[in-house]
C-alpha cells in the first residue's frame, strides 16, 4: 500500500465517490487536504432534477473551499443493482461532466479495481479493506464513501506525481 504524503503536481485534485452519499477528497495545490461527505438526495416527486441541482451546488461549494479545482477524478461504475441505480449513476456522471466543462476542469475516470489494488494490494478488495487501509494511513473517514474518495485521491496523485515517461 502506498499513500502519497503530499501533492507535488502544482494542481488541485478533487476525487469523488459519486452516489446518494458522495464522498469527496481534495488535495490542493498549496498542500492542504480535506475530505468529507455530501448528501446528494434522491429525486423528489414532481422535481426529478433536484439530485442534479444538488450535485452542482455541492461541486461549487467544494470548489470554493478548495480555492479552485484543476482535476476531478471519479470511479467508473460498471455494475449496478438495478436499472434505476445505473440511470442515477450516469445522471450524476453527466451532470459532473457538464459542470466540469463549464468550469474548464479536466476529468479523469479511474477503474475501481486499480484504486483498490493501489491502496490494499488487491483489485477485488472489499469496502472494509479499503476503509482499514485508509485508516492505517492516518486518515479518519466517516465511512466507505469518504474512504473510497481518499483512496482515489491518493491513486490519482500517485499517477500524476510520476514523471511523464513513467506513466502507463
Image (cartoon, helix red, strand yellow):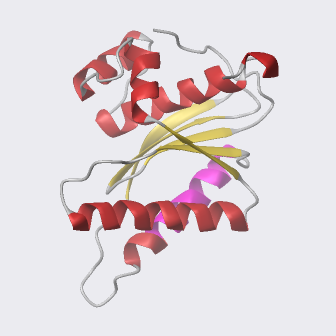
Quadrant hosting residue 85: bottom left
Does residue 100 appear left or right of residue 139 in this picture? Answer: right
Say whether residue 163 is visible.
no
Specify whether residue 94 is painted magenta.
no
Q: Residue 74: percent from the left, percent from the top?
A: 51, 44
Does residue 153 appear left or right of residue 134 in this picture? Answer: right
Looking at the image, which is closer to me, 105 or 6?
A: 105
Reply above or below: 120 against 146: above
Reply above or below: 69 against 127: below
Looking at the image, which is closer to me, 125 or 168?
A: 168
Q: Residue at x 34, y 82 (%)?
A: 48
Q: How many marks?
A: 0
Q: Residue at x 39, y 11 (%)?
A: 121
Q: Residue at x 73, y 47 (%)?
A: 67
Would you say the magenta stretch is mainly helix, strand or loop?
helix
Q: Which residues are magenta?
A: 54-66
Q: Residue furthest left?
A: 81
Does residue 11 appear left or right of residue 58 in this picture? Answer: right
Q: Residue at x 55, y 61 (%)?
A: 96
Q: Residue 145: percent from the left, percent from the top?
A: 34, 39
Amino acid at each position: 500500500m502506498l499513500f502519497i504524503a503530499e501533492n507535488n503536481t502544482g494542481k488541485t485534485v478533487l476525487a469523488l465517490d459519486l452516489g446518494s452519499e458522495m464522498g469527496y477528497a481534495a488535495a490542493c495545490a498549496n498542500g492542504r487536504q480535506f475530505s468529507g461527505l455530501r448528501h446528494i438526495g434522491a429525486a423528489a416527486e414532481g422535481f426529478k432534477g433536484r439530485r442534479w441541482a444538488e450535485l452542482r451546488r455541492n461541486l461549487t461549494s467544494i470548489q470554493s473551499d478548495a480555492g479552485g479545482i484543476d482535476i476531478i477524478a471519479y470511479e467508473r461504475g460498471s455494475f449496478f443493482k438495478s436499472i434505476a441505480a445505473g440511470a442515477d449513476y450516469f445522471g450524476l456522471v453527466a451532470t459532473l461532466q457538464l459542470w466540469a466543462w463549464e468550469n474548464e476542469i479536466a476529468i479523469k475516470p479511474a477503474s475501481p479495481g486499480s484504486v483498490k489494488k493501489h491502496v490494499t494490494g488487491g483489485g477485488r478488495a472489499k469496502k472494509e479493506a479499503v476503509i482499514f487501509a485508509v485508516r492505517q494511513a492516518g486518515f479518519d473517514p466517516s465511512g466507505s464513501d469518504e474512504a473510497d474518495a481518499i483512496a482515489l485521491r491518493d491513486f490519482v496523485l500517485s499517477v500524476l506525481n510520476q514523471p511523464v515517461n513513467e506513466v502507463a
